[in-house]
């Protein structure tokens, strides 16, 4: 005879959940579409943060293009680009998707190297505190007045 699982929620769990719902300021809203200007941060590790979670590869590439335009106009030296690790990617269900390059984690640095290699110094995996292998820090060269894309 199998024991029936209890699905009753304890008063403590219910209270914790209700408090969480009432106080959501600590939860980051990933659905907000921020412009690069709204993502500009003054930190020692990076100057600009872009989160590409939920974007397609094409949308991500457009965001990267915007990043380089914004970086030139605003003298950005380091950008934190969050791609995620690809563990929630739907690549297994799409028979036409590449099993490796469909992940933003691989496609974004390839795109930057292919299209902006003259504009960057390096692309490095972020420290664990900033996302580890799910993000990268791109160090940009200083722009001169005559530089163009």
Image (spheres, grey):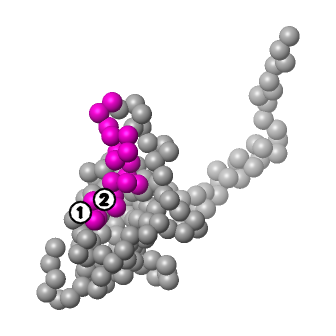
58 left or right, relative to 33: left
- Rendered location of residue 37, percent (x, y): 35, 73
**Residue at (58% x, 67% y) in the render:** 129
Q: Quadrant of residue 115?
A: bottom left
Q: In the rendered image, which quarter is residue 6 located in?
A: top right
Are discs 1 and 2 less than 8 Å apart at CB?
yes
Mark carried by residue 72: none
Comparing 37 with 71, the one in front is 71
Residue 18: x %, y % from top left: 70, 48
- Asked whether residue 113 is drawn in magenta, I would say yes
Describe residue 6's horizontal placement relative to residue 70 as left or right: right
Callout 1 crowding tier (Cα within 10 Å): few <14, some 14–19, many ≥20? few
Q: Is residue 79 magenta?
A: no
Q: Residue at x 17, y 89 (%)?
A: 145
Relative to 4, residue 110 above or below: below
The residue that disc 2 covers is 110
The one nearer the camera, 79 or 25, is: 79
In magenta, the rendered stretch is: 95-114
According to the image, label 1 marks what residue? 114
Residue 63 visible in the current orientation: no
Where in the figure is residue 119, as x and y percent of width and height? 25, 76
The structure residue drawn at horizontal position 86% and vertical position 10%, both measured from the top left corner, is: 1
Q: Nearer the viewer, residue 120 or 1?
A: 120
Q: Position of residue 111 (x, y in %)?
A: 27, 59
């Amino acid at each position: 005879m199998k024991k029936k699982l209890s699905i009753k929620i304890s008063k403590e769990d219910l209270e914790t959940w209700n408090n969480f719902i009432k106080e959501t300021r600590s939860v980051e809203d990933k659905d907000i579409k921020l412009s690069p200007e709204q993502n500009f941060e003054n930190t020692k590790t990076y100057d600009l943060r872009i989160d590409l979670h939920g974007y397609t590869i094409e949308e991500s590439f457009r965001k990267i293009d915007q990043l380089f335009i914004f970086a030139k106009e605003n003298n950005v030296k380091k950008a934190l680009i969050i791609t995620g690790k690809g563990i929630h990617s739907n690549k297994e269900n799409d028979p036409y998707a590449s099993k490796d390059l469909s992940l933003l984690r691989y496609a974004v640095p390839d795109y930057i190297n292919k299209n902006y290699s003259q504009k960057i110094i390096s692309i490095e995996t972020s420290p664990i505190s900033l996302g580890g292998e799910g993000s990268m820090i791109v160090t940009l060269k200083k722009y001169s007045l005559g530089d163009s894309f």
